[in-house]
């Protein structure tokens, strides 16, 4: 389990970091991004989720969103409503993700081909 990652440069030059879903199979098929301005967006089978609150630590050297959010994450702690969920790590830091409408993510963040593999 855990996250796999891929990196690529998009047209406007920001380095985006892509992550498969937490319980993915190692393929880069359910993608998320973390922008340098601290806005995280996770793409998964249930839609697009955007970071809206809590602590977010971004370090391009780190290899998983556990490291980016900080320390160890546990399973989703609480679903505030149908389109919002809180994640909490073992230190009690919380991160809120909120579903946003499809197609409203930043241009250039579309998912890659289903069979694209993440770097080892």
Image (spheres, rainbow, N blue to C red):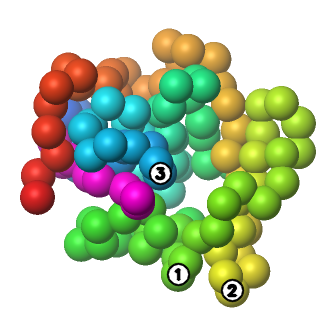
Q: Secondary structure at mark 1?
A: loop
Residue in the picture at 60% in, 36% down: 49
Looking at the image, is mark 2 or mark 3 earlier in the sequence?
A: 3
Q: Which mark is residue 115?
A: none
Among the 4 quarters of the image, the one containing residue 102: top right
Looking at the image, is mark 1 or mark 3 earlier in the sequence?
A: 3
Q: Nearer the viewer, mark 1 or mark 3?
A: 3
Q: Against 32, is 57 above or below?
A: below
Residue 28 place in picture, x, y as percent: 26, 37
Which residue is outermost to the bottom? 91
The residue carrying mark 1 is 71
Alpha carbon separation for disc pair 1 and 3:
15 Å
Closer to us: 6 or 36: 6
Residue 101 place in picture, x, y as percent: 63, 17
Instruction: State whether residue 13 appears in this view.
Output: no
Circle 3 crowding by C-alpha within 10 Å: few under 14, some 14–19, many from 20 = some
Q: Secondary structure at mark 3?
A: loop
Alpha carbon separation for disc pair 2 and 1:
7 Å
The residue carrying mark 2 is 91
Among the 4 quarters of the image, the one containing residue 83: top right
Q: Secondary structure at mark 2?
A: loop
The residue carrying mark 3 is 22
Closer to us: 74 or 1: 1
Number of residue marks: 3
Looking at the image, is mark 2 or mark 1 earlier in the sequence?
A: 1
- Report if the CB atoms under discs 2 and 1 are less than 8 Å apart: yes
Q: Against 40, is 117 above or below?
A: above
Residue numbers of the magenta segment: 1-8
Position of 59 with respect to 78 (left or right) is left
């Amino acid at each position: 389990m855990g996250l796999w990652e891929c990196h690529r440069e998009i047209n406007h030059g920001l380095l985006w970091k892509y992550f498969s879903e937490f319980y993915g199979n190692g393929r880069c098929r359910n993608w998320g991004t973390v922008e340098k301005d601290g806005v995280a967006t996770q793409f998964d089978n249930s839609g697009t989720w955007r970071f809206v609150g809590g602590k977010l630590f971004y370090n391009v050297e780190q290899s998983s969103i556990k490291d980016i959010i900080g320390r160890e994450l546990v399973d989703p702690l609480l679903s505030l409503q149908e389109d919002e969920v809180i994640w909490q790590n073992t230190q009690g830091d919380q991160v809120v993700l909120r579903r946003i409408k499809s197609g409203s993510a930043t241009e250039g963040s579309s998912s890659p081909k289903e069979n694209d593999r993440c770097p080892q």
